[in-house]
Image: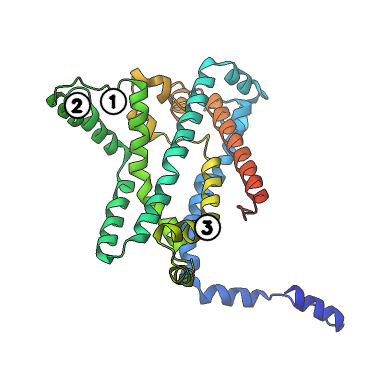
Amino acid sequence: MNQSIAESKTKGLPPKTIKPKRIAKGIWKDYQLYLLLLLPIAYFIIFKYVPMYGAGIAFQDYSIFKGVSGSEWIGFENFKELFAMSQFYTVVRNTLLLNLLDLIVSFPAPIILALMLNELRIVWFKKISQTILYLPHFISWIIIGGLVYQIFSNKGGLVNNMIVALGFDTVPFLTEKNHWLLVYLGTGVWQSAGWGTIIYLAALTGINKELYEAAEVDGAGRWRKMWNITLPGIRSTIVVMLILALGKIMTIGFERPFVMGNALVMDYAEVISTFVYKVGLQSAQFSLATAMGLFQALVGLVFVIGSNAIAKKMGEPGLW
């Protein structure tokens, strides 16, 4: 388009513009695709952009009877109160700790699984393996929490029953914080690793097959081809996924820590999402909970911008 405008200027003709009729014709031609876009667009508008109106509650002495427009503005008083709470630093520490350990343990898991699945040559076995690995993603955390309790419970748990049968003492998987942390991280890997392989398997299909053929001619084995061709081929995808993961370092889901946590492991299980639930819904301190959510979003934004800048300096495309 820029070229056509430049040519028009050199010839003394008015620049070409895209006519509305042409746009409408293009939309009508692919209307099925645009219809498919309506649902995700509606989702983001309703659940992501519209709630931004309520972010002002963080700077108000909010009353549900007066609403957002009628409540008194008090500036940064809610943030001062939030930062003065000793529990605030505990939940921030726990959120960062769990997310950082989750990143270290769970982030490489789908990459490794994708590489392993890519090496499978038996098509039917590969499809069955993928299906089995995807299934945990569709199981609710409520159900997973029940399964974890049945398997790792101190009394009557499957694993502890086997340990006792072998003549050893029971292991407090769910009541001692270090053991609970291992169960928490392991459950997260089991639930998410299979689903995460979809992106990396899609990236693997974009690698030129001729590179593998040339490597075989040069005598390269599977490990050498994986290290010199496969991993560099999906490096940009890994970097983008890492940036997105770092952006969520302060964001943690509510269901997983809430379902798996208990009073004996609150030193690790009390995170931002459960804190917001207790303060905002159970205690009806809506302004304080909103201030916490806004603080969480700002820190996540800083991590995304910072990690994207680092990726740019490393020569990767990044997110923008």
- Toward the viewer: 244 or 228? 228
- Toward the viewer: 260 or 213? 213
116 sits left or right of 156 in the view: right
Nearer to us of marks 3 and 1 is 3
For the residues labelled 2 and 1, the Cα–Cα distance comes to 9 Å
Query: Which label's residue is closer to the chain start, 2 or 3?
Result: 2
272 sits left or right of 13 in the view: left
- Residue named by callout 1: 173
Is label 2 in contact with label 1 (beta carbons under 8 Å)?
yes
- The answer to whether residue 265 shows anywhere in this view is yes
Q: What x and y, as percent, mark residue 78?
A: 61, 22
Q: What x and y, as percent, mark residue 35?
A: 47, 65
310 sits left or right of 209 in the view: right
Q: How many marks?
A: 3
Residue at left 34%, top 43%? 191
Callout 1 amino acid: Phe
Residue at left 25%, top 61%? 125
Query: Which label's residue is closer to the chain start, 3 or 1?
Result: 1
Q: Residues within 10 Å of mark 1 (few under 14, many from 20)?
A: many
**Is the residue 32 above or below the residue 307 in the image?**
below
Tell me how the rendering is colored: rainbow
- Residue named by callout 2: 160
For the residues labelled 2 and 3, the Cα–Cα distance comes to 43 Å
- The answer to whether residue 66 shows anywhere in this view is no
Residue at the far front: name it: 219
For the residues labelled 3 and 1, the Cα–Cα distance comes to 39 Å
- State the SS at label 2: helix
**Is the residue 240 above or below the residue 7 in the image?**
above
Residue at the far left: name it: 165
Quadrant position of the N terminus in the picture: bottom right
Callout 3 amino acid: Pro
